[in-house]
Image (cartoon, coloured by chain):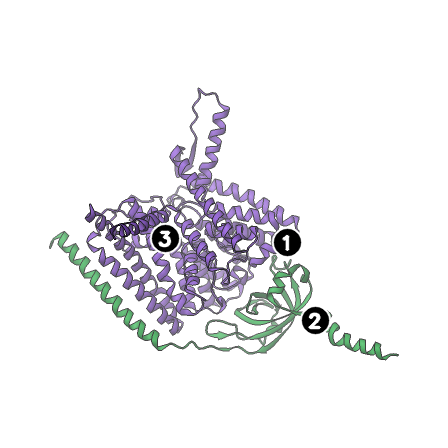
């Protein structure tokens, strides 16, 4: 008799309870598109830290991109101490998972759309990205530079010669 | 007769060539930036692109070298301005294409035209991982475009003044601050460079206060200032100004783009001690009136829908977006889709109108311009007066722009002509957007943004939008920035050449 009740409780603990407490995983597009519905809800957001870790006293701002948009994450400095690499041209940023409260227009931050994070977990450490120089670009650059220099010098000589003819030797 | 015609063509080629050489030389700035930050791949991209521009420019200048002292007519001056912008767009897009951050060359051309015209809408991919060199190029394009690439060439490369004024007017500027146009062009650059130093310093400090490292704060400060002063709207990160989460940064950028949207003649007057000009000038008066009215409408629209929780948020989101649109800057502290999904029709209407009104004439801003709005308002006043007064009384209407000016029919005609051309271009852009499947509100907002060279986006401008719409927007930006006449002159010029060739065959 108790079996169905126990089964229901187990299912609730497995699925419903985590969703209710730590929120559901959302994309940046969904946060923007359904901002009103998700306002002040607990959410989980995953993405790459981009640009800079903006220190603001005992808190930090992290801008986290999931590939579509970047969302501002406001959290305590201590919670973000593991975050070291922010994505730029020369590096892929740390991939993180944040859980916290989503604000469509945060009253604490001048109406910014943001997430106030309660937990920040490092998923993958960022790494350097190399941009190799292609051989054909080197050759093309050399050839084009020589051709351009020749034409510019030729133009300068002709203009100078014409000016001296016009103005005379004095 | 035929010889004279050929000489005119060669003179056009010569001056376009000089402008292109100027654009080739400026690419050494991002090239050096790439070298400083060890971005070797980007350095080679800039070397290829710069050499291409120098090659094309010098060949064109060589073709017309015998005509360098020839006086250009109005038609040729206009063709030089419009032709330089078109060819400049094609050549300046090369580093974008070589970087691999774009889906097509058309997208690269779109972003170059957006930069040069100080519009600010973008089709770039993965902006958050962009090299410092390419970011420098993007912002430099918008800085040069704001002052004018022909103005740059006139300041540095053109010695004689014959025909220079026509090229200067062809680029959408007509104020003479100094006795000759080359001195005027140099003065415009001097004003801009003084502000560049001050503005970069202020934003550098604001960036450090927002939590950026010293080096990053300097680069961001330099780039964001270039975009603010030029009323361009580009920013180094995809979140635009929202990235900094800083009220100080927002206020600093707001001050700079408002100053940037003022007429260079007003800057000159204030810098030479005529401070009363700030409150008397027809453009500052018209700007104050339109901003006040449109702010009230925006606030009403946002309050009605309860979009923002308090007055601070209303200021940092509502007023910032409105003033950014009105000065045709395009900096954003909201996501593009928030306009469409949250702002409602009333606030969107106010921002759309603000984008069409724009900043001042002879400034880095786009739109109808404050001077024309002032002239139209004074015309309305004059006509109402005429109706009210007896026929025997002749009333003279005056407005103040650097000096007291009597309103005459030629000014009225010119103001109405340009405003009509803007409205027609805006309508065509809106129609094109609707034909591509976007709803009226979105199509009108985006069309107002590109026609007025603003850069606020409601989410239409994406790499996935149809190519036909990209071409339409490129045309709108080009027409809006050069204020139509020089582009029309170029079209007539090219059509004339084609017709002549067909007749000869």
Q: Residue at x 27, y 50 (%)?
A: B503
Looking at the rendered structure, the secondary structure element under dot 1 is loop
Quarter holding the N terminus of chain B is top left
- Does the image show residue B32? yes
Q: Pick whichever, B379 or B280, lies toward us.
A: B379
Judging depth in this view, the residue of A56 and B138 nearest the camera is: B138
Q: CA distance from mark 3 to mark 1?
A: 38 Å
Residue position for label 1: B308
Which chain is the one coloured green? A
Task: Spot the residue most to the right.
Answer: A1
Please check whether the numbered discs 3 and 1 fall on a single chain: yes
- Which residue is located at x 59 percent, y 57 percent? B338
Q: Position of residue B402 (x, y in %)?
A: 39, 39
Work out whether residue B334 can be spotted. no
Disc 2 to disc 1: CB gap under 8 Å: no
Apparent side of residue A113 relative to residue B200 in the rendered image (left or right) = right
Q: Colour of chain B?
A: purple
Query: Could you tell me which chain the residue with mark 1 belongs to?
Result: B
Q: Horizontally, is B17 left or right of B96 in the view?
A: left
Question: In the rendered image, which residue does mark 2 sit on?
Answer: A22
Position of B48 relative to B15 (above/below):
below
Chain bearing tag 2 is A
Drawn side of residue B15 relative to residue B259, left or right: left
Q: Which residue is mark 3?
A: B148
Q: Position of residue B469 (x, y in %)?
A: 47, 56
Q: Quadrant of residue B230?
A: bottom left
Q: From the viewer's side, name the closer residue of B207 and B104.
A: B104
Name the one closer to the observer, B142 or B451: B451
């Amino acid at each position: 008799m108790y079996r169905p009740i126990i089964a229901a409780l187990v299912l609730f603990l497995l699925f419903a309870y985590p969703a209710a407490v730590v929120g559901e995983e959302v994309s940046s597009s969904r946060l923007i598109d359904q901002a009103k519905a998700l306002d002040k809800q607990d959410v989980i957001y995953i993405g790459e830290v981009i640009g800079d870790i903006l220190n603001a006293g005992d808190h930090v701002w992290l801008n986290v991109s999931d590939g579509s948009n970047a969302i501002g994450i406001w959290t305590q400095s201590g919670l973000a101490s593991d975050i070291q690499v922010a994505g730029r041209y020369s590096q892929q940023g740390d991939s993180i998972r944040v859980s916290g409260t989503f604000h469509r227009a945060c009253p604490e931050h001048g109406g910014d759309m943001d997430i106030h994070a309660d937990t920040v977990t490092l998923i993958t450490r960022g790494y350097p990205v190399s941009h190799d120089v292609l051989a054909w670009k080197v050759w093309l650059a050399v050839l084009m530079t020589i051709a351009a220099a020749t034409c510019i010098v030729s133009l300068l000589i002709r203009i100078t010669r014409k000016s001296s003819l016009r103005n005379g030797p004095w | 007769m035929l010889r004279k015609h050929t000489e005119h063509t060669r003179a056009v080629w010569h001056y376009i060539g000089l402008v292109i050489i100027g654009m080739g030389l400026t690419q050494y700035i991002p090239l050096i930036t790439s070298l400083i930050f060890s971005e070797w791949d980007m350095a080679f991209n800039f070397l290829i692109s710069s050499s291409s521009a120098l090659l094309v420019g010098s060949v064109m200048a060589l073709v017309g070298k015998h005509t360098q002292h020839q006086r250009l007519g109005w038609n040729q001056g206009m063709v030089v301005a419009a032709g330089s912008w078109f060819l400049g767009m094609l050549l300046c897009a090369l580093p974008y294409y070589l970087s691999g951050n774009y889906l097509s060359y058309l997208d690269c051309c779109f972003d170059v035209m957006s930069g040069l015209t100080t519009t600010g809408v973008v089709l770039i991919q993965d902006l958050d991982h962009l090299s410092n060199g390419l970011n420098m190029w993007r912002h430099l394009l918008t800085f040069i475009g704001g002052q004018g690439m022909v103005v740059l060439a006139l300041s540095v490369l053109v010695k004689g003044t014959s025909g220079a004024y026509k090229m200067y007017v062809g680029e959408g500027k007509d104020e003479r601050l100094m006795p000759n146009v080359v001195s005027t062009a140099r003065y415009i650059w001097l004003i801009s460079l003084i502000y560049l130093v001050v503005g970069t310093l202020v934003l550098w400090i604001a960036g450090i206060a927002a939590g950026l490292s010293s080096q990053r704060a300097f680069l961001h400060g330099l780039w964001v200032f270039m975009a603010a002063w030029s009323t361009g709207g580009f920013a180094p990160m995809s979140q635009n100004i929202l990235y900094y989460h800083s009220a100080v940064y927002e206020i600093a950028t707001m001050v700079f783009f408002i100053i940037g949207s003022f007429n260079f003649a007003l800057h000159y007057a204030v810098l030479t001690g005529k401070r009363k000009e700030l409150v008397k000038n027809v453009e500052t008066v018209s700007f104050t009136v339109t901003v006040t009215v449109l702010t009230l409408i925006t606030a009403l629209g946002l309050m009605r829908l309860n979009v923002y929780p308090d007055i601070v948020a209303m200021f940092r989101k509502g007023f910032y977006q409105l003033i950014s649109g009105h000065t045709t800057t395009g900096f954003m502290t909201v996501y593009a889709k928030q306009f469409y999904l949250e702002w409602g029709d009333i606030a969107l209407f106010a921002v759309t109108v603000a984008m069409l009104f724009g900043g001042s004439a002879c400034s880095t801003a786009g739109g109808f311009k404050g001077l024309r709005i002032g002239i139209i308002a004074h015309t309305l006043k004059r006509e109402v007066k005429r109706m009210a007064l007896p026929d025997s009384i002749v009333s003279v209407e005056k407005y103040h722009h650097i000096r007291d000016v009597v309103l005459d029919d030629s000014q009225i005609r010119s103001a109405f002509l340009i405003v009509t051309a803007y409205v027609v271009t805006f309508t065509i852009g809106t129609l094109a957007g609707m034909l591509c499947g976007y709803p009226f509100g979105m199509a009108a907002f985006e069309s107002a943004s590109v026609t007025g060279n603003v850069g606020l986006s409601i989410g239409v401008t994406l790499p996935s939008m149809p190519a036909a719409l990209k071409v339409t927007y490129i045309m709108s930006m080009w027409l809006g920035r050069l204020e139509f006449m020089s582009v029309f002159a170029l079209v007539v010029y090219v059509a004339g050449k084609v017709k002549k060739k067909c007749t000869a065959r």
